[in-house]
Amino acid sequence: MPRGTFPPFEIDWSDDEPCYVISIAARLVGMHQQSLRYYERAGLVEPKRTPGGIRMYSNSDIAKIRQAQGLIDELGVNLAGVDIIIRMSMQITLLQQQLATTTAELDRLRGTRLPAPYTPRD
């Protein structure tokens, strides 16, 4: 490899991989660190902790915080309402996945032919 060139470098972060300390997470969502701590106490997010106790936020935590911000700022929903909306949204997503799986299984079963029922002759 010629000098000065580097192999492609990609990081495939899972959405649940904790990768942001609280100061960076606060900047990403545009709020104070204390607000993030309050969201944690309210149960809206559960950042992972390092062995030393440092909060680490994932991309899904950031997305959840942004969703909460939108509900609060645009619709005037309180934190209890935000919690309910987020939980219901997650439940709907899960049910949609289950419906898709069940529909695929039903389609597969409809494609199989069963033998004709046996009718004895006297």
Image (spheres, rainbow, N blue to C red):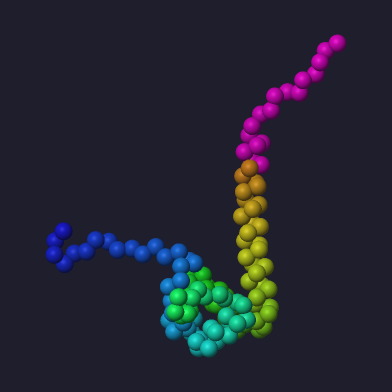
Figure check: 32 above or below 113:
below
The C terminus - image quarter? top right
Figure check: 87 above or below 7:
below
* Residue 114 is covered by the magenta coloring: yes
User: In the image, residue 93 lies at what x, y percent?
Assistant: 62, 61
For image coordinates 66% across by 42% down, the residue present is 106
Q: Residue furthest right?
A: 122
Residue numbers of the magenta segment:
106-122
Observer able to see residue 25: no
The one nearer the camera, 10 or 103, is 10
Q: Residue furthest front?
A: 51
Left or right of residue 11, residue 105 in this image: right
Observer able to see residue 52: yes
For image coordinates 55% across by 84% down, the residue present is 37
User: In the image, residue 45 lies at what x, y percent?
Assistant: 57, 76
* Residue 113 is covered by the magenta coloring: yes
Figure check: 27 above or below 58:
below
User: In the image, residue 29 lies at what x, y percent?
Assistant: 49, 81
For image coordinates 62% across by 44% down, the residue present is 104
